[in-house]
Image: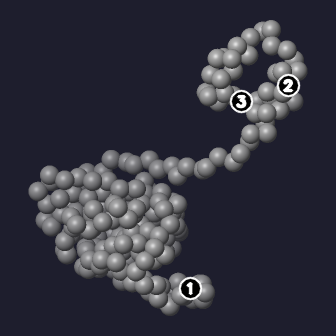
Amino acid sequence: MKKVMFNRRQMLTLAGSGLVSLSASASLAQSLVDEIEADSTPRARRNSMGFRTVQWRDHFDSLRHGAIICDSASRAVHYWSEDESTYLVFPCSVPMTEEFTRRGRTEIVLKRMNPTWIPTPNMRERDPTLPAIVHPGPNNPLGTRALNLSWQYYRIHGIDDERKIGRRASNGCFGLFNHHVEQLYNLVRIGTQVVVL
């Protein structure tokens, strides 16, 4: 015998129509069970993230030029302005594996609007089908903005596939929704300090 679970909407519908009672006929009850079981459409799997609280003072001596913490564990990018009037936290994609994850101190060295994406040599080696270059546009893996870190090939950038947000999906970068990276792009400057946890 299958276990039948009713969601809130189904229970309210049944209750409103007077069908949830001891006098409901067995055949009517069976037809409802069959209908509910037939409506077993796959449900979308949600990205689950648990932002943890981080304090800039635990990682920086000051907020000179602002500060960013890229938190791989909670899959979030935190930003504080130099005058501490602005604090923002954004969900992000993180590196797929520890092999691709680099931790430590770095800084923003270049800001690029509508960036061109060139896969790294290692990415091309792992997947020779990758294009040599992707120009700005909706299919660009860097999205609408890129903030290059002082580490070669590492960036905070937009994203072409929003399903990656909250997942281990990158080759080392931190990907944000495009509207979030555009907001961050307007706030940071060259020299903004970054810590990757």
Q: Which residue is mark 3?
A: 5
Residue 164 lies, in percent from the top left, at 51, 63
Query: How would you rate the neighbour count of disc 1 (Cα within 10 Å): few for under 14, some for 14-19, many for 20 or more?
Result: few
Residue 115 lies, in percent from the top left, at 36, 80
Residue appearing at x 23%, y 52% in the figure: 87
Q: SS of the residue at dot 3?
A: loop
> Quadrant where the C terminus lies?
bottom left
Along the polypeptide, which appears first: circle 2 or circle 1?
A: 2
Q: Which residue is mark 2?
A: 30
Work out how far the residue at label 2 is from the one at label 1, CA to CA, in angstroms: 53 Å
Locate residue 122 relative to residue 32 in the image: left or right.
Answer: left
Which quarter of the figure has residue 187? Answer: bottom left
Work out whether residue 168 can be spotted. Answer: yes
Locate residue 77 relative to residue 87 in the image: left or right.
Answer: right
Q: SS of the residue at dot 1?
A: loop
Nearer to us in this view, 76 or 133: 133
Work out how far the residue at label 1 is from the one at label 3, CA to CA, in angstroms: 45 Å
The amino acid sitting under disc 1 is Leu
Work out whether residue 58 can be spotted. Answer: no
Q: Which mark is residue 130?
A: 1
Residue appearing at x 14%, y 60% in the figure: 82
Work out how far the residue at label 3 is from the one at label 2, CA to CA, in angstroms: 14 Å
Nearer to us in this view, 196 or 164: 164
Residue appearing at x 46%, y 73% in the figure: 138
